[in-house]
Image (tube, rainbow, N blue to C red):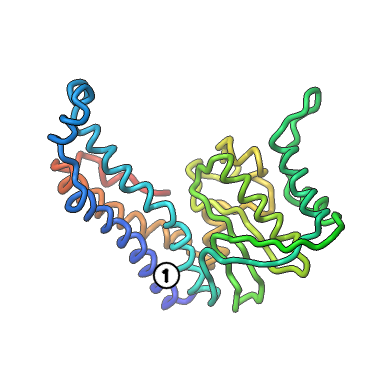
């Protein structure tokens, strides 16, 4: 990535996260603040037992978590548009999948979900599962899939579909993503060259240490070719150095907003060591 492109990506990351955080701050400080008198009136038992600051924190959390849900797609869109030249969010892909392939997709998912008595639990293996699915025959059935982001790369000439999740997705989310990915890869004629399950970052550090149980039910998170975690995801969509750039910008913004939240929302001075909390 050129220096100019790198700067544009940095500005895009700052814009997306700042817009989100500014909306949250406006909500908790102006349009929907925590009013302790209202809390005391509606939950007198809670107020008698637990300090107001605890509920003030949860008030902020609820107004932060929901809007943050789509931020990964927005960030990926900024990065991929700059690097690959064409990226869309919530992209709808229409195609046809044979009845035999659709049946095999459900069969594979059912095996992973339900352990048969007396038989060892089936372990996920994307390449083998896909090979099995693609042997299915039958009548073509119109099928529609909406992927989180879709890249029609001007750089590589390939088409990429991504299911992007926060680092600790639940089982249902992961199952739905895998089913969508199978359907995309089973379409005839082929609509995408690659379909990936991507996690924005890895709270466990190294990929080999990733150990969140729910996605492990559906993917071999360490070895499946369809799984991208942290650095490998950002560098595929943005080129070498993108993840480092992403981490740097997030940590700069984190320092700025944590200080504001302490002072403006909680009404206290930031504690010692608050600058040391960083995304790795």
The picture places residue 242, in percent across and down from the top left corner, at 48, 64
Check disc 1 and report the residue beneath it: 9
Identify the residue shown where x is 23% and y is 24%. Answer: 46
Q: On the image, which quarter does residue 182 sit in?
A: bottom right
Identify the residue shown where x is 41% and y is 78%. Answer: 4
Q: Say whether residue 9 is visible.
A: yes
The picture places residue 180, in percent across and down from the top left corner, at 65, 55
User: In the shown orientation, is residue 179 left or right of residue 254?
Assistant: right
User: In the shown orientation, is residue 278 left or right of residue 162?
Assistant: left
Identify the residue shown where x is 45% and y is 68%. Answer: 78
- 243 and 192: which one is in front? 192
Label 1 Cα crowd, 10 Å radius (few <14 / some 14-19 / many 20+): many
Give the mark count: 1
The picture places residue 5, in percent across and down from the top left corner, at 44, 75
- 160 and 141: which one is in front? 141
The picture places residue 26, in percent across and down from the top left corner, at 22, 55
| Element assignment for label 1 | helix
Q: On the image, which quarter does residue 57 sit in?
A: top left
Identify the residue shown where x is 75% and y is 37%. Answer: 111
Q: Say whether residue 259 is visible.
A: no
Above or below, 25 against 15 in this view is above
């Amino acid at each position: 990535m050129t220096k100019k492109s790198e700067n544009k990506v940095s500005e895009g990351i700052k814009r997306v996260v700042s817009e989100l955080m500014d909306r949250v701050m406006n909500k908790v400080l102006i349009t929907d603040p925590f009013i302790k008198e209202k809390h005391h009136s509606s939950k007198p038992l809670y107020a008698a037992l637990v300090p107001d600051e605890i509920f003030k924190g949860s008030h902020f959390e609820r107004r932060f978590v929901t809007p943050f849900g789509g931020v990964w797609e927005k960030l990926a869109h900024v990065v991929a548009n700059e690097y690959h030249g064409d990226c869309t969010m919530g992209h709808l892909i229409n195609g046809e999948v044979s009845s035999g392939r659709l049946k095999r997709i459900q069969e594979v998912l059912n095996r992973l979900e339900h352990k048969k008595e007396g038989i060892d639990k089936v372990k996920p293996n994307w390449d083998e599962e896909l090979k099995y699915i693609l042997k299915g025959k039958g009548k073509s059935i119109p099928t529609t899939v909406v992927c989180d982001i879709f890249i029609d790369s001007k750089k590589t000439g390939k088409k990429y579909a991504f299911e992007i999740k926060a680092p600790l997705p639940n089982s249902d989310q992961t199952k739905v993503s895998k089913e969508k990915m199978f359907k995309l890869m089973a379409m005839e004629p082929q609509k995408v060259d690659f379909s990936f399950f991507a996690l924005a970052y890895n709270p466990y550090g190294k990929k080999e240490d990733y150990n969140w149980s729910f996605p492990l039910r559906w993917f071999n998170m360490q070895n499946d070719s369809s799984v991208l975690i942290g650095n490998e995801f950002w560098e595929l969509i943005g080129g070498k150095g993108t993840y480092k750039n992403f981490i740097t910008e997030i940590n700069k913004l984190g320092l700025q907003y944590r200080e504001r939240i302490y002072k403006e929302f909680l009404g206290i001075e930031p504690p010692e060591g608050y600058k040391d909390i960083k995304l790795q």
